[in-house]
Image (tube, rainbow, N blue to C red):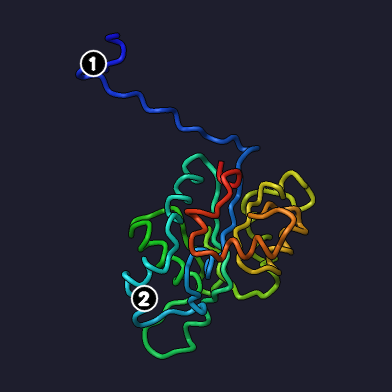
């Protein structure tokens, strides 16, 4: 009977954190607009759209918890966006786009000193010399560029079906989803690019519509 009660100064034992092996590591590629965000930024934000209150309301509930869960066990996470650094020159005054816009969002929701999402470093010629896990380029190639960047960074081979299955895509663009499916990647709704894209666009993606098997 006494075994039912914990001793006064005894601390509860915490369950061991499961860590994935290198072979079991997943690589999550997450779109930004309408996948992480509720409203599409138009790849450009300025004025009230950069206010912390607006941004926190525009990030889907459960996103932060989702990222912390999958990275906590050793999986990788990338943000792949069509937002482009060059868009910032489209308006006068202070504005953010591309890598800076995505990073600004991440710093607000994860904390200013967060290290989960990082920017690429560039030299004086604007050439990337050190990769981050935010990939923001308006390539309009079904994110083929983004996928190749991730494969190179992770040491995965496009011709290896087992490697490609470890790419987990969350994306609201049906054509992009279809491209990744054809490459053998894992998507939210298998065998249906349209349903997978629609699921990614839902406001409650990370709280109600994320398949359990996709996370665990």
Q: Position of residue 50 (x, y in %)?
A: 36, 75
In the image, is 57 to the left or to the right of 160?
A: left
The residue shown at (43%, 77%) is 96
Q: Quadrant of the N terminus?
A: top left
Please tell me how crowded label 1 is: few (under 14), some (14-19), or many (20+) other residues with Cα within 10 Å. Answer: few
- Mark 1 → mark 2, Cα distance in angstroms: 51 Å
Q: Which residue is mark 1?
A: 7
Extreme residue in the right direction: 159
Is 51 placed above or below 151 here?
below
Q: Residue 138 sits in which quadrant?
A: bottom right
Q: Nearer the viewer, mark 1 or mark 2?
A: 1
Q: Position of residue 144 (x, y in %)?
A: 70, 65
- According to the image, label 2 marks what residue? 50
Residue 77: x and y, percent?
Answer: 54, 53
Q: Residue at x 74, y 44 (%)?
A: 162
- The count of marks equals 2
Is 189 placed left or right of 202 in the picture?
Answer: right
Out of 107 and 52, give the one closest to the viewer.
Answer: 52
**Residue occupying the point 65% across, 74% down:** 139
Assign a secondary structure to mark 1.
loop
Specify whether residue 128 is in view: no
- Residue 172 is tagged as none
Relative depth, front residue between 32 and 204: 204
């Amino acid at each position: 009977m006494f075994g039912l009660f914990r001793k006064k100064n005894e601390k509860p034992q915490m369950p061991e954190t499961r860590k994935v092996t290198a072979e079991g590591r997943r690589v999550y590629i997450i779109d930004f607009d309408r996948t992480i965000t509720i409203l599409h930024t138009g790849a450009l934000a300025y004025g009230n759209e950069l206010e912390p209150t607006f941004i926190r309301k525009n990030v889907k509930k459960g996103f932060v918890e989702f990222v912390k869960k999958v990275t906590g066990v050793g999986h990788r996470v990338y943000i792949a966006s069509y937002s482009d650094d060059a868009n910032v020159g489209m308006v006068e005054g202070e504005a953010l786009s591309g890598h800076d816009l995505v990073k600004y969002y991440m710093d607000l929701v994860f904390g200013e000193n967060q290290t989960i999402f990082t920017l690429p470093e560039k030299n004086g010629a604007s050439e990337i010399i050190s990769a981050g896990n935010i990939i923001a380029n308006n390539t309009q190639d079904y994110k083929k560029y983004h996928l190749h960047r991730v494969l190179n960074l992770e040491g995965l081979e496009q011709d290896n079906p087992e490697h490609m299955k470890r790419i987990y895509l969350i994306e609201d663009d049906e054509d992009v989803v279809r491209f990744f499916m054809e490459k053998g990647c894992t998507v939210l709704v298998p065998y249906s690019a349209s349903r997978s894209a629609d699921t990614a666009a839902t406001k409650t993606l990370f709280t109600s519509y994320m398949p359990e098997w996709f996370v665990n």
